[in-house]
Structure formats: structure tokens, C-alpha cells
Image: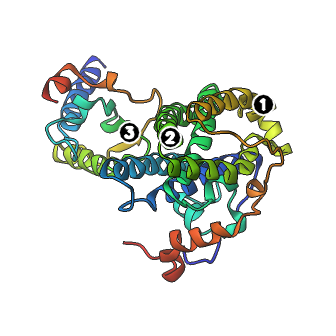
Amino acid sequence: MAVASIEISETPLVLYTLRRADDALILGHRLSEWCGHAPMLEEDMALANMGLDLLGQARELYSFAAKVEGKGNDEDKFAYLRDVRQYRNLLLLEQPNGDFARTMVRQFFYAGFADLYWRAMTKSGDATLAAIAAKSEKEMAYHLRHSSEWMVRLGDGTEESHARAQTAIHDLWAFTGEMFGVDDSERALIDAGIAVDPATLHPQWLKTISSVVSEATLTLPKAEWMQQGGRSGRHSEHLGHLLSELQSMQRTFPGATW
Amino acid sequence: MVTVLQNDVDLRQRAWDAAASVVDPEIPVLTIADLGVLRDVAVNNGRVEVAITPTYSGCPAMNMITLEIELALEREGFSNPTIRTVLSPAWTTDWMSEDGRRKL
């Protein structure tokens, strides 16, 4: 693995799979940053385990992308030997943990989507993606339940927890639109029955999110402008810092194994 | 021909028993058969192929379990077994055996 970064043949299916793998890896890494820092032991375990769910999903997806690409790449090369501009994750998921409320709002927005997304993907025309979906769907349903309970606890809790949750909703809202975007390369996969059109999931997502947010005595912003760029490799400055930690071993000792 | 088939059946049983004896490294009171992590054992021309499934996507015990199955099979005289991971149908607690439930 002694190269600075790998070349990737981004056919539509490889790109599509890498995007979802990157989502899972980056959010999983963010959750792992809570290990040893969560507000209570049970939550420390929960966040680490949910991070592990996402890491497991990422591994399956990277391995599938490597097989489809067929150029000798593998899960480790995809994770450790791509530069920030080669990452294709949603901007939402690379946003820093911030306080606990911000981590939960990010988790809630994404899990609300991923729960619907993976359930729909169990019907994918690709057998491997459908199998990964069947596994992931159960995990994301749990992540949604967990983060929804926290939304209500924080929003309907103290004045301070309410204010922090509301600020996080306000700050992260503009990153939610990217989850429902589709470009030409994905459109072809949707037409072929391999991928699902995320736009069809939006009404149900908004219904779920709105209902929990309202129960939590919080409000959703009216703003409609949405930030995007992650899917094409245009990231916020936060991802580079995250990768410098995630990739530090392979960057310092290229090709190291043990 | 019948003898060959019979041999395969016997071999499969021996291979299954060996693989099924592997315990969960995190809950050693349960075997991978109790847990429903062991999905299938097939023998073709003396070569063993084992299918296992993770309880959750990020299960860190999968590498350990794979290694333990390989060792258990090697001890029974099956060389170079193949261990593959299957994701579908996804594992739920319904896959646990009655025996596994009782032990838990």
C-alpha cells in the first residue's frame, strides 16, 4: 500500500457504492470520537456500538465496490488511501460532534433517512446491495429510535438542553437536502432498479422528523436553501482534519501491516 | 456412487460438528450453532465450505470466529476450508436455537 493515494475507476455503480460506504465510515468515525467522553457509561457504549454498526456497513460496501471495480483495491485502500477530494460522503456526516445535542441531531436527521433508504434498498435488483440493506435497515431503525428518544429528552428537558438542541437543528438543517439529491450517474442506476430514488423518501422522512421534533417542543427552520457538495468531493474543512486522524498510521508508515 | 455420497454425508456431519463446537469469544457459554451464526456447512470432493453470518454489521468477533472454525476443521483433518460470510437473510434472535436460549 506504499502509495500516496489510489486511482479509482468511478463507474456509476462503484461511485454509488463508495458514496454510501463513505457515509457509513465518516459517521461511524465521528461516533467513535465519543468513546470515553459520553455523558454516561450506557451512552458511551451505545455510541461506540452504533459507530461499529456503521463501520461494519462501510466494510461491506467498500468490499463490494472493490469487487465491482475489479482493479485490486480493497476496503483498507478505499479508507486509508484516498484524499479528501476523493471522499463522497454527505456533508452532514462530517460535521463535528460539537456538544451532545449536535451529535444527536445529526444522528437523528441521518438515521431518519437511512432507516427508510435501506428498507427500500432491500428490493434492489443487485443481490449484494439488497443483502447489505437487509442488515443495515435493522441497525438504522435502532439508531433512529435511540436518537428520537434523545431528541425528546433534550428538547423537552431543561432550558439549556432545549436551547442546545434547537441551535443544532438550526445549524445542521441546511445539510439535510443533500440526502435526497440525485445526479445523472445515479439516475441510471435508479432506472435500472438497482438504486432507489431518495426523493421518494422525502415526504416520509419529513413526517417522521417533524413529528419527533414537535413532540420535543422544538421547531424546524423555514429555510429552504440547502448546501451540497460532498457527493462530488467538495467538502467542508472538517473532513480533512477527520481524515488526518483516521489515516495517520498509513500516512506516517505507508504500507505498514501488523 | 452411493458410497461416495454416503461419505460426503458423513464428512459433512463431521465438519458440521467441528464448526459447531466453536464458541462465541464474547459469550463462551454459547456455540456459534446455538447463536445461529453458523449457517451452512458443505463438503465437495473433501473440501469444506462454511457459511457464517454476523449478528450485527460491525461484529468484531467475526475474524476470531473464522479463525477458530479453520482451526477446528484443520484439527479434524479438513485442510484449507473456505469460510464465507453471508448477510442474507439477516440475523435476528429468531436464529438462536432452543438450547442457546436455555443456556442464556
Quadrant, the C terminus of chain A: bottom left
Whole-Å distance between the Cαs marked 1 and 3? 30 Å
What residue did someone put label 3 on?
Answer: B54
Q: Secondary structure at mark 1?
A: loop
Determine the chain carrying the residue at label 3.
Answer: B
* Disc 1 crowd, CA 10 A, few/some/many (<14, 14-19, 20+): few
x and y, in percent, of residue A141 in the image: 51, 32
x and y, in percent, of residue A10 in the image: 75, 55
Q: At x 26% / y 29%, what residue is drawn?
A: B12
Whole-Å distance between the Cαs marked 1 and 2? 34 Å
What residue did someone put label 1 on?
Answer: A192
Camera-nearest label, 1 or 2? 2
Whole-Å distance between the Cαs marked 3 and 2? 24 Å
* Disc 3 crowd, CA 10 A, few/some/many (<14, 14-19, 20+): many
Determine the chain carrying the residue at label 2.
Answer: A
For residue A237, say whether it is visible: yes
x and y, in percent, of residue A154 in the image: 50, 44
Residue contact between numbered discs 1 and 2, judged by CB atoms under 8 Å: no
Q: Amino acid at mark 2?
A: Ser
Residues marked 1 and 3, same chain: no
Q: Amino acid at mark 3?
A: Pro
For this orientation, the residue located farthest to the front is: A159
Q: Nearer the viewer, residue A144 or A149?
A: A149
Q: Amino acid at mark 1?
A: Ala
What residue did someone put label 2 on?
Answer: A147
